[in-house]
Structures are given as structure tokens and as C-alpha cells.
Image (spheres, rainbow, N blue to C red):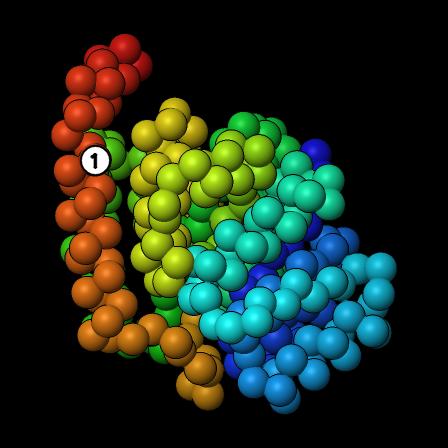
Amino acid sequence: MKVCAVIPVYNHGEAVGAVVHAVRSHGLPCVLVDDGSEPGCAAVLDGLAREDSTGVEVVRLPQNEGKGGAMMAGLRAAQARGYSHALQIDADGQHDARDIPRFLALAQESPDTLVCGTPIYDESVPKGRLYGRYATHIWVWINTLSFAIRDSMCGFRVYPLAPTVALIDSVRIGKRMDFDVEVLVRLFWRGMRILNQPTHVRYPTDGISHFDVLWDNVRISGMHARLFFGMLPRLPMLLWRKVAK
């Protein structure tokens, strides 16, 4: 198993350095995807790559593609560089990098599974975001006929690259905040097993959120509708999978 971290970055110049150093402390190379960031952030990323030329690489997108677009570019780049797995972690510092060894241990034990973070929140989580997640949880459980995915919105996870890149190369998947949910559901439909790893998540008071309350919720609602109609022809397969367990 050969693993790197893929970190999508959009104007997180103040926080990303600490995230990169935390990830590198666990021995993981980093692929930083500059998602059309402003020049100051782009310069920070270039500086991180110069400091650690063997462990940090920047993949630069000419314009902002959204978190999903950045992740897809990073996953493809990781596979092209010979990695078998990629750890996704956010650039804003909300994920606890101290849990990386737990994620990697699960991936090592079951290399064909996707290890997905299940958030344990502290008091910093915005209540609107917390409660809003439950609507997505319910739709994901409906669209998979399963509780296997405990939290589909946590962007701290380990992907097996071959099946994941095969999926994103063959199916149109949302490029923005809908990506994290949709890629999990579609991988589940293709038979991928999901392992859930509890992890502490915090929302820094000075953090930058790129979640657009209106338009990202519109996109996510549209995604749930598409997935529901995509689930219907798969219903016999999903039911058989439950019976055959």
C-alpha cells in the first residue's frame, strides 16, 4: 500500500501550513491542489513545496473548480504518481491529524475498503450545520438502503485509488460541496465496503468556510434527487445485497 495525502486548497493560506506539517509528521507525502487560490495563498503553497521538495507537490488548477473538482484532480494526480491510496483531509485545520494513524491502520487491514471519518464535534460546530447534516444522512440511508455510511459529509477519509478514479472517470459527479456525499454513495453502489472511523472535528473561530448556504444546499438537494432516481433501478441489487448478508 502506497499512500499520499490529497489536500484541496482554496485561499487557506493561513491554515494550510500547519495542516501540511501535521500530515508530513506521519510520513505521508502531500499533493496540494491549488483550486484557483488568490496569489498570496498560491505563494504559500509554492513555499511549502520548496521547503519540502520530496514530500510536498502542488497541482494547480487555473480557475476555481470547487472542492469536488479539486479532489478529482488530486486523486487522478495521486494515481498517476503510483499511489494506491489517498488520504483526504481539509486545508482549514478542522480535522484532527493525530487520527491519521488510525485511518491508515484500517486501510492497511482492508485495502479494498474506503475508510470514512465519523465526526465527534465540540462546542465550536455551528448548530445550523450540525442539524442540517441529518437531512443528508437520511437521504444517504434511503439511497443506499443501508446504514453503512454513518456520515457522508466528513472530508477526512482514505480512498482506494483504482476504483475511485475509475468511478470519477466514468460518471459525472458534482464538483463542489456535493462531491463528498455523491462519491461515497456511488462507490457503495459499486460494491465498495465502507469503514467508519470516529474522529474529532473542530470549527476554528477564525477559519474560512467556502460553504455557500444557498447554492450549495441547492446543489446538494439536486444531488439527492439524482441519486434517488439512480437508486430505483438499483433497488433489486441493493435489496439482494441486504438479504445475502
Residue 38 appears left or right of 3: left
Location of residue 92 with respect to 101 vertically, above or below: below
Instruction: Find numbered disc 1 in the image and state the secondary structure of the residue it sits on.
Output: helix
Q: Position of residue 169 (x, y in %)?
A: 48, 40
Q: Residue at x 43, y 66 (%)?
A: 66
Q: Residue at x 43, y 58 (%)?
A: 68
Q: Quadrant of the N terminus?
A: top right
Evaluate whether residue 127 shows in this view. no
Q: Quadrant of residue 216?
A: bottom left
Q: Residue at x 73, y 40 (%)?
A: 82
Residue 69 appears left or right of 224: right
Q: Which residue is mark 1?
A: 230
Q: Position of residue 33 (x, y in %)?
A: 60, 64
Q: Position of residue 78 (x, y in %)?
A: 66, 48
Counting every numbered tag in the picture gives 1
Evaluate whether residue 174 shows in this view. yes
Residue 131 appears left or right of 192: left
Q: Residue at x 62, y 87 (%)?
A: 39
In this view of the protein, which residue sits in the foreground, 27 or 160?
Answer: 160
Location of residue 83 with respect to 53 vertically, above or below: above
Question: Residue at the top extreme?
Answer: 244
Q: Quadrant of the C terminus?
A: top left
Mark 1: few, some, or many residues within 10 Å (few <14, many ≥20)? some
Amino acid type assigned to the residue bearing label 1 in the image: Gly
Q: Position of residue 203 (x, y in %)?
A: 41, 75
